[in-house]
Image (tube, helix red, strand yellow):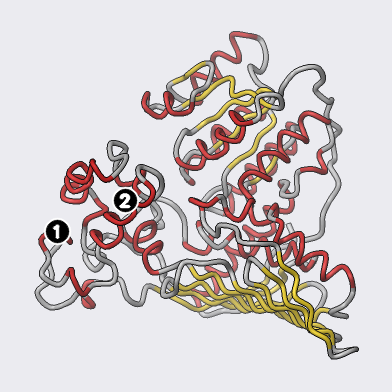
Amino acid sequence: MADTPPTHPTAPIEGRPVRIALVGAGNRGLTYGDWIHAHPERARLTAVADPDPRARDRARADTGYDGWRSLLAATEAAGGPLADGVIVATQDRDHVEPVLALARAGYAIMTEKPLAPTEDECRTIVAGVEAAGVPFAVCHVLRYTPYTDLVRSVIASGVLGRLTGLDHLEPVGWWHYAHSYVRGPWRREDESAPMILAKSSHDLDWIAYVTGQRIETVASFGGLSHFRPENAPPGSTDNCLTCPAEPECPYSAPKLYYPALRRTGGAWPISHVTDRAHGPADRAVLTEALRTGPYGRCVYRSDNDVVDNQVVAMRLSGGATATFTMSAFTEQTHRQTRIFGSHGWLRGDGERVTVHDFRHDTVTVHEIGASGSNAADGHGGGDTALVESFVTALATGDRSHIRSGPAESLGSHLAAFAAERSRHHGTVETVPAR
């Protein structure tokens, strides 16, 4: 979907840092909070709302509330917003109420994706924030990376000619999928959202953003092919710590989490397993968490139901075709993309872009340098650029710094819902324009 200008001007903030409140002090919320704390001259975390007092402590905000309703009550008691903007980083199914209520109270909003797990709720959020007239950003972090800027600049240069097709792979990674989508909080659609929405709405959004074309028609196939009880190794048990098959299992919890504890201490993914392990000396703490919690259980005997592989075929508004593949059965690395044009083609791997110009039969390699590909590594610079852009938009009153506004984000969500309808019913689906 092409960029759209803001519909409501925003008054710039002068003479002080932008005040930000945080709703939901989990991994994503704390990541954005880290940027704010690192730039006190530009922003200040004035409030955090989370029911967990330990999470509130980790956020290091000026004031703590036990939830967004308490923040809203304090706002009403004060007669107006206690901050310039709010970051909503709660779980997927807990976005609608706080986003709508805080927008009506006058807060600018930045919310995690997906907007919500149903089409009706997504439309409700978009209608609500547009009616409130407040600045609104969705955390489609891939839009904000230097790599994305490079891909868009190559396309804009005209070297590829007319775009004819695109092929995009999201290599989730065997261990990352086991951690987040078999054992973790995104393992079930009824507790989070379908995989195409919870994980891959990033990718559908990115395809529309870099091409400048709307996704108009989709057909999708996929399912949960491997992480099922019938695929459990013979003699295996419910928990990796007691399983005789564990040494040869690629999804072994000890193989994943003990090295991660040594390498990263208490950072992600260990922070999801336990908040009490902070380094190699805490191996016993981690062991107990694996023994008693969800992250030590057998990947073949979990209660997960989200897909582990999915493909989507698309027709774009400019006439180009596109394909998208999400797979759990890869290394955990950057997205891989090939873009085809009438006069050249592009290969991208998240760190470099290789362009073959048919006119002169020349190959040019554009490097951006190494950068992380996942949440632990800041999504290739997207996490920091996103929150910086949101703060800049509020500070200057210029909403064009927000690349992922309500209309743009709704487009990628509608494409995801259409892909799920296609996957479930074997149909070719038209994506609504709005």
Spot occupied by residue 243 in the image (x, y as percentages of width and height): 12, 65
Q: CA distance from mark 2 to mark 1?
A: 18 Å
Spot occupied by residue 382 in the image (x, y as percentages of width and height): 64, 51
Where is the C terminus found, in terms of image quarters? bottom right
Q: 47 or 309, which lies in front?
A: 47
Which numbered marker is on residue 424? none
Q: Is residue 225 left or right of residue 234?
A: right
Q: Is residue 340 left or right of residue 121?
A: right
Local SS, label 2? helix
Q: Earlier in the sequence, mark 2 or mark 1?
A: 1
Q: 91 or 141, which lies in front?
A: 141
Local SS, label 1? helix
Q: Is residue 43 left or right of residue 251?
A: right
Which numbered marker is on residue 262? 2
Spot occupied by residue 29 in the image (x, y as percentages of width and height): 52, 37
Reading the image, the residue beneath label 1 is: 241
Image point (42%, 24%), residue name: 57
Image point (57%, 74%), residue name: 169
